[in-house]
Image (spheres, grey):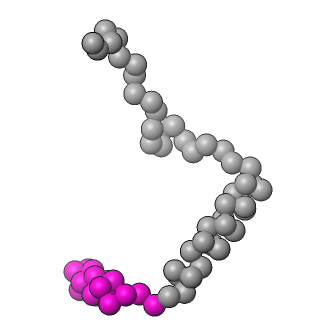
């Protein structure tokens, strides 16, 4: 059975705005994300990724 008057959709996008985070929380998240992805960012790209990048560069020329 459906609701006779459905709830309006939640605000999303630019009008809703980002939830504010304290500077300490943002700093903590940033440090943890950098630690988590450090190895991935330092590794050379795979051959498949290099091919895809080359295709994108060729399309943009």
What segment is highlighted magenta in the picture? 44-60
Tell me what residue is drawn at x 24 percent, y 84 percent.
55
Residue 50 colored magenta? yes
Q: Position of residue 32 (x, y in %)?
A: 67, 66
Tell me what residue is drawn at x 44 percent, y 42 percent.
13
Q: Position of residue 51 (x, y in %)?
A: 27, 87
In this image, 44 relative to 6: left or right?
A: right
Residue 52 colored magenta? yes
Give the quadrant of residue 3: top left
- 22 to 9, vertically: above or below: below
In this image, 44 relative to 29: left or right?
A: left
- 21 to 57, vertically: above or below: above
Give the quadrant of residue 38: bottom right
Camera sees residue 57: no
In this image, 58 relative to 17: left or right?
A: left
Tell me what residue is drawn at x 37 percent, y 87 percent.
46
The residue positioned farthest toward the top in the image shown: 4
Q: Nearer the viewer, residue 36 or 5?
A: 36
Q: Position of residue 47 (x, y in %)?
A: 32, 90
Tell me what residue is drawn at x 41 percent, y 87 percent.
45
Camera sees residue 5: yes
Q: Position of residue 35 (x, y in %)?
A: 65, 74
Q: Nearer the viewer, residue 37 or 27?
A: 37
In which quadrant of the rendered image does the C terminus lie? bottom left
């Amino acid at each position: 059975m459906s609701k006779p008057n459905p709830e309006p959709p939640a605000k999303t996008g630019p009008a809703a705005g980002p939830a504010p985070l304290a500077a300490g929380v943002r700093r903590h998240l940033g440090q943890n994300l950098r630690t988590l992805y450090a190895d991935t960012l330092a590794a050379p790209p795979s051959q498949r990724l290099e091919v895809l990048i080359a295709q994108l560069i060729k399309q943009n020329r």
